[in-house]
Image: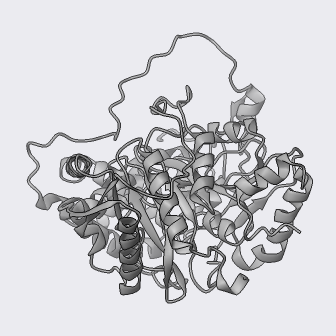
Amino acid sequence: MGIDREQLLHVAHLARLELRDDEVERLEGQLNDILAAVSKVSELDLSDVPPTSHPLDVVNVWDEDEPRPCLSVEDALANAPERDGNFFKVPPGGTA
Amino acid sequence: MIDTLRLTAEEAKRLLETRQISGAELFAAYRAAIDAHDEELHCYLHVCDDPGGEGIPIALKDVIGTKGIPTTAGSRILEGYVPVYDSTVVERLKAHGLRILGKTNTDEFAMGSSTENSAFGPSHNPWDPSRVPGGSGGGSAAAVTAGLAPWALGSDTGGSIKQPSALCGNVGLRPTYGTVSRYGIVAFASSLDQVGPVARTVRDCAYLYSIIAGRDACDSTTVELPHAVELPEAEELKGLRIGVPKELNEAEGIEPGVAAAVQAAIAKLEALGAEVGECSLPQSVEYGMACYYLITPAEASSNLARYDGVRYGYRADATERLEMYERTRNEGFGDEPKRRIMVGTYALSAGYYDAYYGQAQKVRTVIKQEHDALFETFDALVSPTSPTVAFPLGARTADPIAMYLSDLLTIPSCMAGLPGLSIPCGLSEGLPVGLQLIGPQFAENALFRIGHALERAIGFDAVPERLR
């Protein structure tokens, strides 16, 4: 399985990356090399093997739903590139 | 006169407790060493002033969040970011009085094996500055070897603590997954990321691990240690059974000098009383790399979605919101995070999920089962940590897959969530060779015991010849 330019641009959009033309050029070759290497996993017949998503057998951890101190508004906004009062400010736009 | 090149944390602690040196003198000695050598080695991205106190100084890989101290993860997208809270590991260090010397260089978002993916330029190996210190935690490893810190914390996803320790000739532990909190750590691949110690001796490594390990209410993937950390003392290994997995010791690409140094160390293990036997991990090494380079990009593509220019970090100029996201991420991320975000997004996308990510998760089960089976017979496994000694800067940057192979021998046990300790076992071509000990989950004490006895038997001089 390989990735063509159209798929690459689609994936870049899904990942919200605006790639430059020279990057598209370079990535197309590199991604196909990487995908060819990782496709090795398909050599194994593992239809009866369960997947592992996590290395420890831990189950969900429940916590009491009790309010406790958290970041102040000032701390939460301390690294904001732009703020408006108690809000993060972003440029307008409806599609994303 | 404090010799930062040879002082262990254990000895520093004793000198402080008996008031033979003051906390201020000790901190100043490391700052002077940093001033003298860091221009050449570039271990640090940020150096701190002495916060006062009598504790041992420590360096932290720059993926570890530190309140009031910049934390960049080696990325432009976090340039200028100053956390407003401490990670749990930093809280624990501070509770023990430890003082932060600075933040060390790393491949961007810990993605790499040489520090050459750092947006702020590479670190250099103290044994030979024309060579890489390994990565991603090359800054921490180089700082400890060069005497610019007595010890340090790194983080390890597929080898980022052990491989740099091997290439720099010091001791690094990747702890059992779940024993050290990830709260406040810049996330790369959450089902693998673990913080761990880098030190000059196995005992220092064990002591630092005892400070940071244990359950944390802020990280629900953490567990309590089943037994307390023991500082190793034994100098023999009677009764221990150590396996030598064929595939990890005979893999293509292992340099002859590396294999020879490790084989000599294995003979010492036997001389110390351990029972040594051959064994096999037939699929783990063969399929480990492919599995790792599907699972970790998939998790990274999700974790790195948070860098969108809204709440913190870099934001590109744009008049419209989608444009702002896409431009911020393209200008803020370097090549390696972009490659991994692309691979991960693709591997998780509709139509490809089962063939790539789903299949990789099943391979992960096979890797775990193969290791579990060996630990019915053996207490630990041994192999080289890295197939090669430190390679020249630039040697692997043009070929991502060649760089990925640097972690061939560390990746399988990481996928299985197992602890691994790397100790120096000799030189090849004048550069350190690392030996890796892998144990079952929560077997850190056994690894420390074996590592300590072997370290004594080998008597490796961890100070680079050019600095002696």
Percent x, y of residue B111: 49, 61
Q: How many marks?
A: 0
Percent x, y of residue B326: 52, 54
Q: Is residue A83 above or below residue B169?
A: above
Q: Is residue B244 visible?
A: yes
- Color encoding of the figure: one colour
The C terminus of chain B lies in which quarter of the figure? Answer: bottom right
- Residue B341 lies left or right of residue A64; in this view the side is left
Q: Nearer the viewer, residue B109 or B445?
A: B445
The image quadrant that residue B138 belongs to is bottom right
The image quadrant that residue A73 belongs to is top right
Percent x, y of residue B386: 42, 72
Q: Is residue B35 above or below residue B156?
A: below
User: Which residue is depicted at the point 67% across and 65% down?
Assistant: B144
User: Which residue is depicted at the point 74% across and 80% down?
Assistant: B40
Q: Nearer the viewer, residue B85 or B77?
A: B85
Q: Nearer the viewer, residue B250 or B279?
A: B279
Q: Is residue A39 above or below residue A47?
A: below
- Residue B235 lies left or right of residue B320; in this view the side is left
Q: Nearer the viewer, residue B277 or B257?
A: B277
Percent x, y of residue B3: 80, 70
- Residue B6 lies left or right of residue B77; in this view the side is right
- Residue B311 lies left or right of residue B1; in this view the side is left
The N terminus of chain B lies in which quarter of the figure? Answer: bottom right
Q: Is residue B431 above or below residue A96?
A: below
